Amino acid sequence: MAANLKALQLAGIKETKCEIGAGAYTRVLEVYYCGTSFAAKQIQPSARLREGPQRTKDNYVKECQLCIELRHPNIIQFIGIYHSSDSSLPVMVLEYMNESLTAFLKRCPNVPLATKMSILLDTSLGLRYLHCQTPPIVHGGLSSDNILLTAQQVAKIDVSSLVVAKVVDIESKKSQLGTVDFLPSSSTENDMSLDIFSFGAVTLHVATQQWPTPESTMSTEVERRQCYIDQMETGCMEELRSLVMTCLDDDPVQRPTIMVISETVKEIKQSSMSTVTCSVEHSSNLTNNVVLTLKGSIYSIGTVEEAAKKEHARLLQPWLESLVKETVESETLHTALAKVYIDSSSDPDQFLRENKFYDSKLIEKHHKKEGSCTKSEQGNGDAEDSPFKTEACDLVKQGDINLWTTALDPSNPNRKQLIDQVIETAIFQTDDAEKASVAVKAFMMADLPNELVELLEKMILGKSAFADNRNLQNLLILTAIKADQSRVMKYIDCLDNFDAPDIANIAISTELYEEAFAIFKKQKVNSSAIDVLIAHIDDMSRASEFAEQCDELAVWSVLARAQLNKGMVKESIDSYIKADDASASSEVIEAAKGNGNFMDLVRYLQMARKKSSDDIIGRELAYALEKIS
């Protein structure tokens, strides 16, 4: 045990006495280790221990050793332990988190569906990691209180409660296992099925943003929570509703495994982000109906060009085609329709080759841009590309993943030409989100990251129906991070509908620090942006300039903390004063006195005295004034 204790022990912990939270058996304080903020969880002195002091300490260290070996993006990282005069047992040091899921759902009354699905997926993946250990680790107390979130709403499961449950003599079995509202009413099981039940209750809480208090008069667990389940009847919520009901099954054997749950949640999340919004489709259909009533109106190139400026040219297509079918042989009309076909990439080649009425000179720049063949070029068209273009269009239109797999097989001698035609022309032939997603999936399955970047760039930066698709924008940036990092900054600059916090964190993990900074700055998450400058780019000069530009209290506080950790006492005091932040008074006092920097300390303490009635600040101010006089 002594060897294990030594391996877990952390030296140089700085306690701030700043309490983050407290419960019946534990309290959590903020501490600093190696200049970084962490959460320190200690057993309350009033908590009754299960066994004698030495046996309790042995069990405590054993459970801490188990927790420190758990490493997963959705499990709160257990850093180590240290000894404190306030606790008979060592204090657990954990990754610092922003807030609990409970607090987040209460603070934000209208959480977007995408954020809800990300939180549930994160939680399921963390639980899956625990259940896949050998032997499986049962959390036993999963609830919204011990699912914690980062500032970017990445969800992580707190496993430190496993340590507490092993050493504290908790009166109620239910209290030991977790919040009673997230547990079955009468079952005493404590295996993986219990965690599944709790995940179902957490899903209810996230979906409805109402605490899932069960109705005591009902018989089954589903019936006891029926009023919340009934609120999940539309869209993706309906799919989640079925999942919740299986998780809450009275029979533990009938509950799904966490592997099934995580895959189901992933599919629901993807489906919720894969299609163009219904409002856009409705708007397009409405516009189509309107233009079909304009048969008697004057048709002109100007009308089409004006629509093209608003990226709605393709909506004129039904109207123009209806006039062509009526054998209207106006050059203006046919030229307008040719322009629509070219600008919307609606398979213009056949029309341009066979039609006799359009003005080929007027649309010359369009056919050159889009690679189409006009009637004046029919004699020397590119015959080699034609069959590949046709095959590529057929692939996209059919949306058959098996055909895609065959076409993109490395043994296909024409694979390159086919890929080129898909990217340049064919992908624009569909407005069907499902068929477009099959094409993207096929490129991913064929392990063609560079080509996938080209395809997604065409779909998003070109004139396609999917330009604003959030899922595709995410995929474009992530694929570029993997395949061609030189493009990432360009995409960050020109795209606006991607999951910025998640992408920024991934950029940090791949050492694309400037890109991460650019994302946070663009989204005006300035406290995270300056943290990148300080912690990753390590440029205090840029950080100071950025703080001056932003002039936000939170940004000055982050800068002040970093300057203090680097021994830049005067600069730190200046920043703390600009931040109007007296939270680190004890550390500032210690550092300034150590440097003999009493002039600046007086300025800081004068600010701090306005915010706190602490006698220490008054005494230290008097002492500093005496020193400078």
Image (cartoon, rainbow, N blue to C red):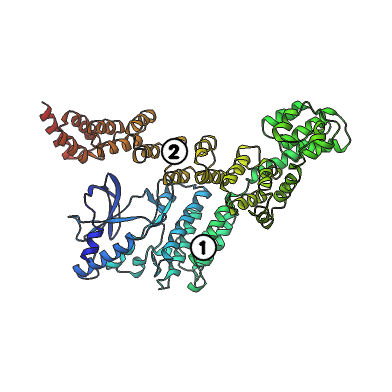
Query: Image point 42% across, 72% down: which residue?
Result: 186
Question: x, y percentage for residue 27?
Answer: 27, 55
Give left or right: position of 106 versus 366. Answer: left
Relative to 179, say whether 577 is above or below.
above
Q: Quadrant of residue 308?
A: top right
The residue under label 1 is 261
Q: Residues within 10 Å of mark 1 (few under 14, many from 20)?
A: many
Would residue 43 appear left or right of 398 to someone viewing this image? Answer: left
Q: Residue 497's mark?
A: none
Which labelled disc corresponds to residue 520? 2
The amino acid at mark 1 is Ile
Residue 463 vertical position relative to residue 265 in the rendered view, above or below: above
For the residue pair 28 and 427, the one nearer the viewer reads as 427
Distance of mark 1 from mark 2, alpha carbons? 32 Å
Local SS, label 2:
helix
Q: Is residue 236 left or right of residue 320?
A: left
- For the N terminus, give its image quadrant: bottom left
Is residue 231 visible to us here?
no
